Image (cartoon, grey):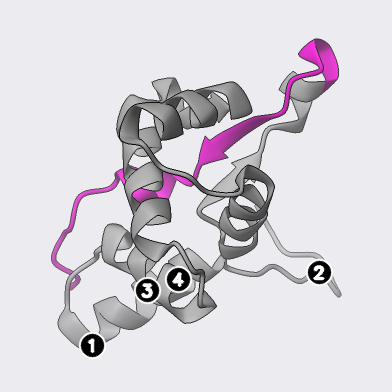
Amino acid sequence: MTLGVGERYYLPKVVRSAVQAAKETGEWSFIYAAGECLKESGVIDEGEVSLLLNALRMAAPRGKFDVGDMQETCSVLNIKIDMHDTIDFMVRCGLISPCTQRSLYTGLAQYEVHPCLYWDSQHVS
């Protein structure tokens, strides 16, 4: 892929946080970066959102889930959060992103956990 004249790209907040932490510690830790995004955003239910994100990350096949999966996970974990606000926040931070193609075919909103949240901590050279 090459950048065209005038094209701009950005890193999601979770990736920027991970790069900053790696510069300081010499280790990649995207889970740490996700926690930092939660703290910096001032989200009220930081612990619950972190718990939900981790559960979705572990349970979602290929990283994809829908709102029903989120609701079921919240129910199992006894998490009481505003689903719309939580999805909005997680998308803005780059923790998840919408999968628009699936929505067009099924009418169901589906999301994908950012792939970096599946990478293990590794030493940065």
The three-letter code of the residue at mark 4 reads Cys
Mark number for residue 24?
A: 1
Do the CB atoms of the residues marked 1 and 3 lie less than 8 Å apart? no
- The residue labelled by disc 4 is 37
**53 lies above or below 19:** above
The three-letter code of the residue at mark 2 reads Glu
Q: Say which quadrant the C terminus sits in.
A: bottom left
Task: Give percent across and percent down for residue 67.
Answer: 61, 29
**117 lies above or below 41:** above
SS at mark 3?
helix
Residues at marks 3 and 4, CA–CA distance in whole angstroms: 4 Å
- The residue labelled by disc 3 is 36
Considering only order in the chain, which callout, 3 or 1, is on the residue closer to the N terminus? 1
- The residue labelled by disc 2 is 7
Task: Give percent across and percent down for residue 44.
Answer: 49, 69
Q: Which residue range is magenta in the image?
A: 104-125
The three-letter code of the residue at mark 3 reads Glu
Residue at the image point whose x is 65% and y is 70% from the top: 10
Residues at marks 2 and 1, CA–CA distance in whole angstroms: 30 Å
Task: Give percent across and percent down for residue 52.
Answer: 39, 43
